[in-house]
Amino acid sequence: MGQTTMKAPNPIITRFRKNPILTRKDVPYPVATVHNAGIVKHNDRYIMLFRSHLLNGRSIIGRADSEDGFSFTVHPKPFLIPSTDTVFAEYEAFGVEDMRISLVENEYLLTYSAYSRHGVRIALARTRDFENVERIALITQADLRNVVIFPEKFGDRYVRLDRPHSEVSSWSIWISYSPDLVHWGDSRMIMKPVAYHWDEMKIGPGATPFKTDKGWLHIYHGVFKTMSGTVYRLGAALHDLDDPASIIGVSDQWILQPEDPWEVTGYVPNVVFTCGAVPESDGTVKIYWGGADTVMCAGTAVIDDLVALCLSVSRPAL
C-alpha cells in the first residue's frame, strides 16, 4: 500500500493562511505555472526568482518582490530566459529552472538547471542588485541537479551541495569544493536515502543552508514511491559549522508534506519542493515551496525546533 498524506497534528511548519502566495494569474505575461523559487532578503525586500512553464512547456525564471515575504508583485518581464549566444545558448535551449540564491562576499550567486538536447547541467550566474546578471560558467556535467552553494567560504574554497543521477545507487546528496566557482572537485557523498523511509526513493538539496548556533541548517527534499505515484516531502539536516561535509543530524521525520489541494493536485501531483528559505531575526525562518509544480506557497517555522528535530529525532546520514 502507498503512503497517505494525512495532515500532521502538530505541524513543524505553519502554512501561511493565504496560500498559495503566487499563481500564474499574478504573472503579467503568459505562463502555465509558478513554482520552485529561490528567495532572498535584499535591501529589506524579499526577492523571489520563480520558475514558470511557458505555454510551449519550456521553463523561464521570473522575478517578484515583497515587503513582508508573503504578498509579492511580479515584474513585467522575466528575470532570466534561455541564452541566445555563447556556450550557454546550446545548453539552455530547452529552458532554465529551479534557481537557488546564495549571498557570498557581497555578491549573489545564482545556480539553476539548464536543459537542452544534451540533458540537464547546472549553470552559475552572479548579481549584486538583481538588475544586472552575469553568467559565469556551466559548473557540472550532465546529469546533476539541485546545486546549492553555502553562503560562506571554507578555507578559501566555495562549497556546494548537489545531487547526481545514478542508475547504480539511490540518488543522494554530495558535496564539492571550488577555488574559483568554475572548477569543482573533492566530491563525495554525504547523505543518502533510508530504506522504507519517507525519503527512500531519492533525496536532493533544497534551500540554501543557513547558519544557526548548532550548525548549518539545510531544508532538503525527499521522495517516496507509492502505488499511485511519488510523494515529494521536505526534511531537515544539520551540517557542522566548520566542516559542512560532516552532518551532525538528520531529522527522522519529514517537516512538510503535500496536504493542501494545490499541493496534492496540479501539474505534478503530491509535491512540495523548496529552493529557498529566509531566516529572520526573531528566531523563525520563512520557508517557500512549489505546490504540485503549479503554485508558490510559504510557511514559517521556529529555527530551534528544526535544529532540535535534527539532534533529538535523528536518523543516520549514510
Image (tube, grey):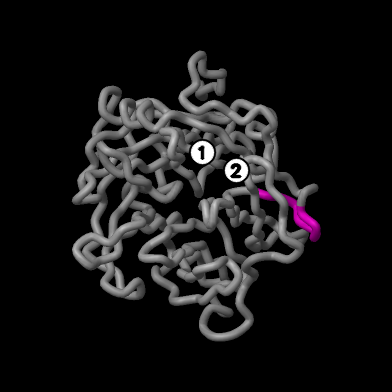
2 or 1: tag closer to the N-terminus = 2
Front residue of this view, candidates 178 and 170: 178
Q: Is residue 45 above or below residue 138?
A: above
Front residue of this view, candidates 125 and 173: 125
> Residue 38: in sight, yes or no?
no
- Expressed as whole percent of the image width and height from the top left, the position of residue 230 reads 53, 36
- Give the magenta-colored segment's residue range: 27-34
Residue receiving disc 1:
286
Is residue 31 covered in magenta? Answer: yes
At 26% from the left edge and 23% from the top edge, which residue is drawn?
Answer: 312
Q: Does the CB distance between marks 2 and 1 fall below 8 Å?
A: yes
The local secondary structure at tag 2 comes to loop
- Expressed as whole percent of the image width and height from the top left, the position of residue 226 reads 51, 30
Q: Residues within 10 Å of mark 1 (few under 14, many from 20)?
A: many
Residue receiving disc 2:
69
Label 1 amino acid? Lys
Question: As drawn, is 34 to the left or to the right of 178?
Answer: right
* Furthest residue in direction top, as rendered: 9
Q: Answer with the quarter of the image where residue 197 lies.
A: top left
Q: Is residue 155 above or below residue 276?
A: below
- Expressed as whole percent of the image width and height from the top left, the position of residue 136 reads 45, 76
Q: Quadrant of the C terminus?
A: top left
> Residue 224: in sight, yes or no?
yes
Front residue of this view, candidates 209 and 84: 209
